[in-house]
Amino acid sequence: MSLGIPSADFLASVRDALGREAGPPAAAYQHLLESAGELELQAAEIRRRNAGDLPLLLDKMAGTAALRGWNVQRAGGGEDALDYVVSLARRLGVESAARAESAVFSAVPVDAALAGAGVVCWPAVYDADRERDAVRRRLAESGLGITGADYAIAETGSVIVLPRRGLSRLVSLLPPVHVAIVRAQDVIDTLDDLFVLRRLEYHSDGGDMGSYLNFISGPSRTADIEQTIVVGVHGPREVHLVLLDKE
Amino acid sequence: MAEVTTRDFAAASRAAVQDPQLRRAFGSAGAGFDGARRDAIDEVTPEVWEQWRQQARSIKEHAVGNLDYYLELLERNVAAAGGQVHFAADANQANAIVSEIVRTRGVKVATKSKSMVSEELGLNHVLEGQGVAVFETDLGEYIIQLAEETPSHLVAPALHKTRGEVARLFADKLGVPYSDDIEEMARVARVALRQKFLDADMGISGANFLVAETGTLVIVTNEGNGRLCTSAPRIHVGITGMEKVIPSMQDLAVFLRLLPRSATGQRITSYVSMVTGPKRAADEDGPEEFHLVIVDNGRSRLLRDPALRESLYCIRCGACLNICPVYQRVGGHAYGWVYPGPIGSIVTPELVGVAQAKDLPNASTLCGACREACPVQINIPRMLLHLRHELAESPDSQRRTASDTDALLARGFAAVMSKPLLLKVARRLGRLAVKSVTRDGKIGRSRLPFLSRWTAARDLPAPPARSFSDIWRDELSRGDR
């Protein structure tokens, strides 16, 4: 139930302050008029443009991501990616790595590869034996969190993560080191591209945005003491982006 | 509502100006944040930057101009996503809403990510009175909460504190060994707060933007505490001013380009989190409840006055603070309330009452740097003048006297300026007077009645040996003409 003052009263007082009548804006807002069909055309154009310039786009992604503080690794395929993740786990000396759910792990089976190196790689999901708090504790104690990416944005060097089965929000946040494995086909050029694609998914998905969307653009950082930048405050201090040039 | 000490601006700013450490701290906002902002603009080119500013301004103009419509759309879409919008006319109502959620859900521990609106409401105090343990989790906010102080900057709340002061604070309050190593202090905060995030029943956040089209709350952060506050507890409460709504998700692109660059010179922050409702049935983590508290608390006064409405376009980047010669010298606390600097000098008087904050519209040189720095092209100097005008016209007796003096001075000025001979004589006399108090090319503490207020806290450079009109007469007026 709504607390505070009734929304009708609040909106009426705003309207009164503006001196306007109830109803939509006099000049209709372009983006809000776009139908799912129009968004589909825009999305098709984005996909065509990005696929046409893929090698350039991947170079741009790698470049801006490095500027944002990602350790960028270009991987020719799944094998290269696995080698990188295994050697990273070895270097860090971690015993446990948490993994989010993602389609990318069928091409890059990190569980088995890490197990071969003596590292327990476990999917961060609840099951009959594992209570929420226990899974969270285990996650907080893991030295490494591994996720896929729903999109990656070349303009900003950002990895985009959407809800997945399991503790998908926390896998990229609680462990001190995060690895994101990004597929070439998920790299897009600009922020505008992302929002067209998400709006299309929203409007063709019965109006559900999903509970969250996170941009991750480098390590956790702060400059709150004497404007001095420090990495690794509440989130990871070290982040790795493995960019798969092809599946 | 948070304590208001805006009446003490003159005394507080005098004290701040004489504190070398504060001068250093706030002066560095210019070199640090503002320098980074300029670099970021050069990188995209000033032409592109202007296009973005224009675009952002039109979006805000449209959204604020039709605010009731977009708030209604937002409310509908938050509800469709399983969340709940609550409207609050003032601070008491907003606090009562959060208190009610706390009471009915048995909340014991709350973690907060940075929210200036919650500072405005004095929310922590209210929740603590209810027996809730409230933890600020942004490093700067955590520092000032431990120190029992208020933010001194919109983006860097603990800008006024030195590393040594923070080290002493942590040693005293947290019982850790004294260390003024900044990395170590960040680690101390991480360790102190990590378990709180996981224990908290409620996470409280502000909002940088609200997207009406999808019912989405957007926060732009760097530390990861915002993500933890909105992910780990079973209840998420977002609290924000009613002006934060934008029509479409597509509009976010330009604001995500402008905000980080204007605030810290970053091309994008480490995190941008978009929250739409509580966790869905299929999600295994995320809050079970999502509440959005939308606050008026005086904003409709800004909305009602067409001359002040554009102050509601503000995205709280802090660029106008970092560039302001007054803010750089007096710092954030002198302004006496939550929002300091040029934008605060407009917003504060309307939110706390003009009678309480008469000095703030005058706390500006009207140099116009804030307007140039503003990513949404807010014409701050024009609004400051508007407020000064209103104050001068108000029936308040103290102001009346001051404006009589002003009027007399203005009449004298007009009389001199309109008679060339008189002007010439006045100029000569003025130069002689100034020369008599000049030492080493500077005017130090002056004994002259009109100059002393200028020179009490700073040296005034002496005028050059020859005036411009002399140079014009002797050299420049020949040649081309």
Image (cartoon, coloured by chain):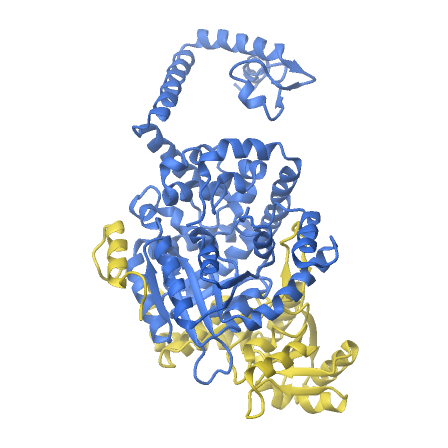
Chain colours: A yellow, B blue
Residue B160 visible in the shown view: yes
In the displayed structure image, the side of residue B212 where residue A27 appears, left or right: left
Q: Is residue A236 above or below residue B437?
A: below
Residue A127 position, x and y percent, is: 55, 91
Identify the residue shown where x is 44% and y is 49%.
B2
Residue at 32% x, 55% y: name it.
Answer: B89
Picture residue at 57% right of the left edge, 65% below the top: B225
Q: Looking at the image, which is closer to me, A74 or B75? A: B75
User: How far across and how far down the image is residue B159, in percent?
Assistant: 61, 47
- The reply, left or right, for residue A122 in relation to residue B219 is right
Q: Residue furthest left?
A: A21
- As rendered, which of B292 and B328 lies closer to the eye? B292
Residue B424 in the image, given as x and y percentages of width and height: 49, 9
Residue B355 higher or lower than B147, as above or below:
above
Work out whether residue A55 or residue B180 is closer to the camera in this orientation and state it.
B180
In the figure, A228 relative to A76: above or below?
above
In the picture, measured across the screen, residue B397 lies left or right of residue B371, that is: left
